[in-house]
Image: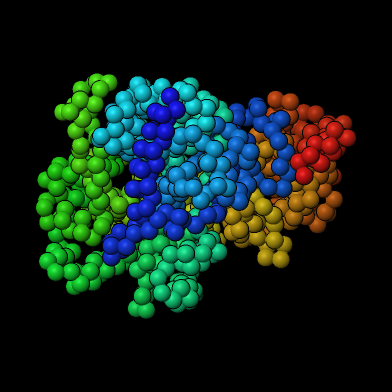
């Protein structure tokens, strides 16, 4: 078995090297390719401390009194290290363009290369990296390994692969692109489904890469969620120094200049893909003052791609001249259909795609680099033997990044207005979760303002469309009456800030609230869900864990501060009440939790209590204790908490809460802490 294990390992390493030694950070990079280790920038990764649990299990969860349940990890390598992330099931999620696939290839590099001795992957017997976008109709993971990773000349059968894996104890499987999995919404009974549930390969480490918001319904209860948070200023500069040619200081200075002229770019460049496009295509003539939205920025980057390709044409004899005028209407429709079908399609057989979009359009996309070719093997009939003629090589094409598919599909969506949108499009879009294709809607709103209002109205009428609608709102310009009407509609329902939100989404909501306050538009309800950090009394603002600040909102009616885990707010409760007192229109404040929020037993700030009493502002304290839900209200006369039926909170009950949230340190606890350090 050792010989066959070595054979399989060598085939895997050879396949991965072909991938990670041919990285193009952006399309059409004048033929330049990188090794993944020369492009990948480590950092800005959050890991969830505790696997997802039902609310009744949260009462005894580990205490984390001054932070959310998410913590930064030092390196991507921690995800693969059982000493840091012990769970055998990990979901690695991130926004489109945040580098999930690149991180997977960096892990493959660590496993393959002898120089990465510090990586925990060096102790792994097998690393299996599977792109789920290719696995339409494939039920066996062994067949997928055979078809999509191993070369045609490999004599190992599916049964051989199974037997080899059964004899291994340390295997890591990375399932890349769950959001692109063609059988995502089907009822296909496959190994992938069983692996995600935890009923297959329960002792192997499984990393499932997916877009934020595209999470499997049936998860192994041990699953831990890891989130890529994008580029901050430090990582942007590190990327420039690592990948840029020539004078890196000139690019850095250009970046600073652009941000000063157009602050929106700071948020857009949190997306590593957007930032890498800037780094590799910037020149002294680059001007981005009109890139005030994702649509305008992406449109500008595509123009840069064509400009760079024309530059390459001038250097090469016989190159096809690009005019950027090929008829793309069939392309727009094909991309839209691929994204909105029940079984999503973002990879097509080469000849089928060329026939559908036309030869001129196909050649243009290939030459610019927006469309890339790939191949896979396909079995004609079920067989355990690699008999010639039973295995075929299929040539496929796909977009360089799914964002390009959403860009072209958005042209089709934005072009369908009026009654067509009201009837036929609604039927099609009902099959789509807006979060899974948020850029489709955002681009469509930016491309055609006349369609934007109907798209936003449609999104707000769906179950999960509010976050997407909020981002769409800032993609185009409105007339004054239109913008006030839309703001009023968007502020009429609860708006939630979540710990997993991108800064761009949170900032767009804050901008929405500022405009609402300026125009005296009521803000019905704001929920701060597991991302409250502190109150800045000097700036009269509520600080989120993302670093952004929610200013004083005079037209806010209700504020809810929610936590998933035991949280001690005793030191910060008075500051929160002070902030609330300055929000002149606030009628209700709720502290809520799936577990215990610890607040002061009494509030002794008579000035704040007087303001709350004068405004008839209700302050509620909701928490879960011993599987019972308690709701207390603040008596603004006495400053004490009371129950509508039981009166003021007994001192004994309060002491029990304190003991639960802040358990006394025993000798055994001290010894355990000493061992940890």
| Residue 517 locus on image (x, y percent) | 55, 61
| Residue 51 locus on image (x, y percent) | 59, 33
Residue 334: quarter of image = top left
Quadrant where the image shows the C terminus: top right
**What residue is rendered at 23% in x and 71% in y?**
311
Up the image or down, 394 lies above or below 98; here it is above
Up the image or down, 188 lies above or below 431; here it is above
Asked if residue 644 lies left or right of residue 223, the reply is: right
Asked if residue 638 lies left or right of residue 476, the reply is: right
Residue extending farthest to the front is 3
Up the image or down, 238 lies above or below 472; here it is below
Q: How is the image coloured?
A: rainbow
Q: Is residue 48 visible?
A: yes
Q: Nearer the viewer, residue 159 or 664?
A: 159
**What residue is rendered at 67% in x and 52% in y?**
533
Q: Nearer the viewer, residue 288 or 468?
A: 288
**What residue is rendered at 31% in x and 25% in y?**
157
Quadrant where the image shows the N terminus: top left
**What residue is rendered at 52% in x and 61% in y?**
235
| Residue 443 locus on image (x, y percent) | 33, 55
Q: Nearer the viewer, residue 199 or 525?
A: 199
Q: Is residue 140 visible?
A: no
Residue 85: quarter of image = top right
| Residue 504 locus on image (x, y percent) | 48, 57
Q: Nearer the viewer, residue 75 or 428?
A: 75
Asked if residue 162 lies left or right of residue 302, the reply is: right
């Amino acid at each position: 078995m050792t010989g066959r294990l070595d054979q399989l390992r060598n085939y895997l390493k050879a396949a991965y090297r072909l991938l990670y030694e041919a990285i193009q950070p952006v399309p059409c990079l004048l033929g330049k390719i990188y090794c993944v280790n020369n492009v990948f920038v480590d950092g800005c990764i959050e890991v969830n401390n505790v696997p997802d649990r039902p609310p009744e299990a949260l009462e005894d969860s580990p205490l984390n009194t001054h932070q959310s349940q998410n913590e930064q990890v030092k390196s991507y390598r921690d995800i693969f290290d059982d000493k840091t992330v012990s769970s055998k099931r990990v979901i690695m999620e991130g926004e489109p363009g945040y580098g999930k696939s690149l991180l997977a290839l960096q892990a493959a590099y660590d496993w393959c290369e002898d120089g990465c001795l510090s990586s925990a992957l060096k102790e792994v017997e097998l690393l299996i990296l599977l792109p789920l976008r290719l696995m339409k109709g494939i039920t066996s993971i062994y067949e997928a390994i055979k078809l999509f990773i191993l070369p045609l000349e490999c004599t190992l059968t599916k049964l051989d692969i199974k037997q080899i894996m059964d004899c291994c104890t340390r295997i890591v499987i990375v399932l890349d692109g769950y959001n692109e999995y063609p059988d995502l919404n089907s009822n296909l009974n496959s190994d992938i489904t069983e692996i995600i549930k935890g009923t297959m390969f329960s002792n192997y480490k499984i990393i499932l890469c997916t877009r934020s918001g595209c999470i499997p319904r049936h998860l192994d209860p041990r699953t831990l969620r890891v989130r890529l948070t994008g580029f901050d200023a430090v990582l942007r500069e590190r990327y420039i120094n690592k990948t840029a040619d020539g004078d890196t200081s000139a690019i850095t200075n250009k970046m600073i200049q652009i941000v000063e002229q157009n602050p929106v770019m700071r948020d857009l460049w949190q997306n590593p893909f957007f930032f890498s496009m800037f780094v590799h295509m910037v020149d002294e003539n680059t001007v981005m003052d009109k890139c005030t939205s994702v649509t305008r920025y992406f449109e500008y980057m595509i123009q840069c791609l064509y400009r760079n390709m024309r530059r390459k044409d001038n250097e090469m004899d016989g190159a096809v001249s690009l005019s950027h005028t090929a008829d793309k209407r069939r392309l727009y429709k094909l991309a839209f259909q691929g994204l909105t079908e029940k079984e999503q399609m973002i990879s097509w057989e080469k000849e089928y795609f060329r026939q559908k979009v036309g030869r001129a359009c196909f050649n243009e996309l290939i030459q610019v680099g927006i469309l890339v070719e790939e191949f896979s093997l396909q079995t004609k009939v079920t067989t355990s033997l690699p008999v010639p003629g039973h295995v075929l090589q299929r040539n496929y094409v796909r977009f360089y990044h799914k964002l390009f598919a959403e860009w072209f599909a958005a042209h089709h969506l934005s072009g369908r207005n009026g009654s067509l949108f009201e009837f036929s499009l609604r039927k099609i879009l009902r099959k789509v979760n807006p979060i899974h294709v948020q850029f489709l809607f955002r681009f469509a709103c930016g491309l055609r303002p006349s369609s934007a209002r109907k798209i936003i109205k449609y999104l707000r009428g769906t179950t999960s469309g509010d976050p997407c609608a909020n981002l769409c709102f800032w993609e185009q310009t409105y007339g004054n009456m239109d913008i006030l009407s839309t703001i009023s509609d968007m502020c009429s329902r609860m708006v939630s800030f979540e710990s997993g939100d991108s800064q761009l989404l949170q900032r767009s909501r804050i901008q929405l609230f500022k405009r609402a306050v300026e125009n005296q538009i009521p803000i019905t309800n704001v929920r701060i869900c597991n991302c409250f950090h502190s109150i800045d009394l000097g700036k009269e603002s509520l600080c989120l864990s993302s670093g952004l600040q929610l200013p004083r909102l005079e037209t806010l009616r209700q504020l809810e501060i929610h936590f998933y885990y035991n949280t001690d707010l005793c030191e910060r409760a008075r500051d929160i009440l002070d902030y609330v007192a300055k929000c002149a229109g606030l009628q209700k404040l709720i502290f809520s939790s799936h577990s215990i929020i610890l607040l002061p037993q009494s509030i002794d700030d008579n000035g704040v209590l007087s303001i709350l009493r004068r405004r008839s502002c209700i302050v509620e304290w909701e928490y879960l204790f011993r599987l019972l839900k308690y709701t207390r209200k603040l008596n603004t006369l006495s400053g004490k908490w009371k129950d509508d039926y039981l009166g003021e909170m007994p001192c004994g009950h309060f002491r029990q809460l304190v003991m639960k949230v802040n358990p006394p340190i025993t000798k055994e606890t001290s010894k355990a802490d000493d061992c940890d350090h």
